[in-house]
Image (spheres, rainbow, N blue to C red):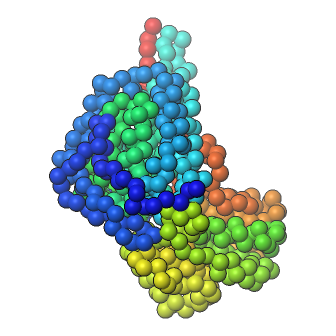
Amino acid sequence: MLSFDPNSVKIPLGNFINGKYQALSGQKIPVKRPSDGRFYADLDEASAEDVDQAVQSAQRAFTESGWRSRPPRERGAVMRRWADLIENDRYLAQLESLGSTRPISDVIHHEIPFTAEAIRFYAECADKYSGDLFPTRDSSLGMLIPEPYGVIAAIAPWNFPLSTASWKLGPALAAGNSVVIKPSELTPFSTARMAELGVQAGLPAGVLNVVQGRGAITGQALITHPLVRKISFTGSTATGAHIMSAAAYHGTKPVTLELGGKSPQLVFNDAGDIDELAMRMLRGFTANGGQACVAGTRLIVQTGIAEALTQKLIGLCKGFRPGLTWDEQTGYAPMIDEKQGQKVASIVAAAKSQGAEVLVGGERFADTGEGWFWQPTLMCNLTSNNPAIEQEIFGPVLTIQTFEEEDEGLALASHESYGLCAGVHTLSLPRALRAMRSIDAGTVWINRYTRSGDFIIPTGGFMQSGIGKDLGRQAFEASHRHKSVLIDF
Ligand code: NDP
């Protein structure tokens, strides 16, 4: 039985500094449950002074706790224990489900195992990265030695609080850094519990700290703190640009940015079974209510199967029902809040005013009280400058464009500003590889549209979709700075 009573879940204090929860005296931020819009807790916002305390504690832990100097396999062992605790903590799952857009069955079956496995992947990386040796003169030895940065700041959004945290904490901690993470103020509590479990697993106090509050207050104090040596951010392109410029002015800190997307699903006539294809498209834009950076939101389909695929999708879109995230029967995610729902509504309205036709959906579900659920929406008749094609909507809205010839489809697939992901669907290998080469995107999925459990494959965007990679060995390597050493002997 996965369903639970949301009022029975004790809400922890949100700020976790130097190994314990801290009550702070700053502003209180009311936090609401997305699926019914009801208030459930006040969050203490961390002021600049509180952030300073967290960063100082992380710095002390970096220099004094022995975490960085511990044999890497021992760091890995602590992280594996942490992953086990995460996987078995029903309380963590309930906090995530109650406070985010993720239905409890999704949290238990996907989000939690995915989070735990990401931590395990980086536990395994801990002793498998060794820098380089250079060919120098016989009487000298040249080396490149990886070292942890020190304190890394992680800033996470609200759409996948736990797994996004694991992508940032896993590589940073396995490399011996300390971390201060700020979750979104909309989804604050599960990350704090995750940190508490880390201490139970053996992370020294101060190695992992959680500060809470709005981006402009708490986030800004964190990224500009002089002791923060690197920033890892996931969120909107606008905030990513702000963070990059703040990082340049406040210490020339390196940044990893995982930003927005407007990813195409390029479907050719020979893409195979139409029912399977329709399900693939459907999941690509409705998972988490479309609130995923990688959502496949632009269907670009060859005319031979366009009508059949569209009709299948219209039928499937009508099958969704809203529900409370703590009910195990619920399969469809709410919008995170009214503001996000209104954003979806306004882009759909703007798209219609510029000639787009809504085939199904196009509205908020009725009778969901203060919770906001958007109906899965299909739109057609779109020119390439329609707002629904140009802008990231971050809701369950799929635009449909058709093409006759391969070149035409390829031209539509690349977006002028975003380049996060792309789906290519064809049973012709040469065509799939031509599309893979042509599309400007950091990830291309061929005949699938979702991440796998292969954490070895990095993820990250081109152009305005970001800089650097999360996951893979690349994220672990990027959690180090590299010292060049030359020894004469
Ligand atoms: P933001 O990019 O504004 O927020 C992401 C995180 O950055 C949050 O923790 C936020 O804090 C923090 N933040 C905001 N400003 C600063 C700052 N000056 N310094 C440091 N941290 C800061 O996204 P929103 O939540 O406002 O969502 C807006 C839009 O962004 C969505 O509609 C969607 O299009 C896109 N988005 C994309 C995501 C992705 O995965 N690519 C994820 C989430 C959103 P806080 O929110 O607590 O103020």
Above/below status of 117 relative to 415: above
Q: Position of residue 387 (x, y in %)?
A: 49, 81
Q: Is 417 positioned to the left or the right of 435 in the image?
A: left
Residue found at x 43% / y 19%: 486
Q: Quadrant of residue 355?
A: bottom right
In the foreground, 216 or 290: 290
- The reply to whether residue 116 is in sight is yes
Residue at the top extreme of this rendering:
489
Quarter of the rendering occupied by the C terminus: top left
Residue 198 x/y as whole percent: 42, 37
In the figure, 233 relative to 484: above or below?
Answer: below
Q: Position of residue 314 (x, y in %)?
A: 68, 82
76 shown above or below 159: above
Instruction: Give the x, y percent position of residue 77.
Output: 51, 27
Q: Residue at x 53, y 60 (%)?
A: 3
Give the number of marks. Answer: 0
* In this rendering, position of residue 272 left or right of residue 411: right
Quadrant of the frame with the N terminus: bottom right
Is residue 474 visible in this depiction of the protein?
no
Residue 253, image quadrant: top left
Measuring 71% from the left and 76% from the top, which residue is drawn there? 301
**Residue at the spot x=40%, y=57% of the render?**
8
Quadrant field for ligand 1: bottom left
- Taking depth in this image into account, of 133 and 187 the one nearest to the observer is 187
Depth order, front residue of 414/121 = 121
